[in-house]
Image (cartoon, rainbow, N blue to C red):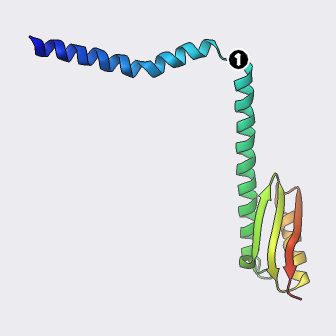
Amino acid sequence: MKQPINKIAFAAFTAAVMSLPLAGAAFAADSLSAQPTLLAANEVDKAEEAVSDTWITSKVKSTFLAEKNLSGLDIKVETNKGVVSLSGVVATDAERDLAIAKAKEIKGVHAVSADGLKSAD
């Protein structure tokens, strides 16, 4: 007789423990204000911006690698809020200018900073 009572007690205890997270969410739903929603929207904007910056960096780098007149492996590309920063050393001033021009052609690029991109000439 003790064994069935232990099973029922264990089942009730397990059900109670498993329902705690759900109960917390139900009580918290009433106390939510507009502020957390705004914070969530800001976080989404930051995530979209990060994805865009990552996409821009990848697109610029792949464009450099596909361009036969650029040594794409020698150019470091970073993007922050649509501003592409180029750094490294290229063979000539013409190659530096080409890298800047190619980066500016990419959709989503607002500006190109090439202060860190030097030519060996």
Q: Using the image, determine if residue 9 lies above or below residue 57.
A: above
Dot 1: element: loop
Q: Specify whether residue 66 is in view.
A: no
Residue 56: x, y in percent? 76, 58
Where is residue 111 drawn, in percent x and y?
89, 59
Q: Quadrant of residue 113?
A: bottom right
The residue carrying mark 1 is 33
Q: Quadrant of the C terminus?
A: bottom right
Residue 107 versus residue 89 in the image, above or below: above
Report crowding for label 1: few under 14, some 14 to 19, many 20 or more residues within 10 A (C-alpha): few
Q: Quadrant of residue 34?
A: top right
In the figure, 42 relative to 69: above or below? above
- Identify the image quadrant of the N terminus: top left
Q: Specify the quadrant of the image occupied by residue 114.
A: bottom right
Q: Is residue 27 visible?
A: yes
Comparing 74 with 116, the one in front is 116
The extreme bottom residue here reads: 121
Residue at 87% across / 78% down in the picture? 96
Question: x, y percentage for residue 30?
Answer: 62, 12
Q: Nearer the viewer, residue 65 or 28?
A: 28
Q: Residue at x 79, y 76 (%)?
A: 88
Question: Tag 1: residue type?
Answer: Ser
Q: Position of residue 15 (x, y in %)?
A: 33, 18
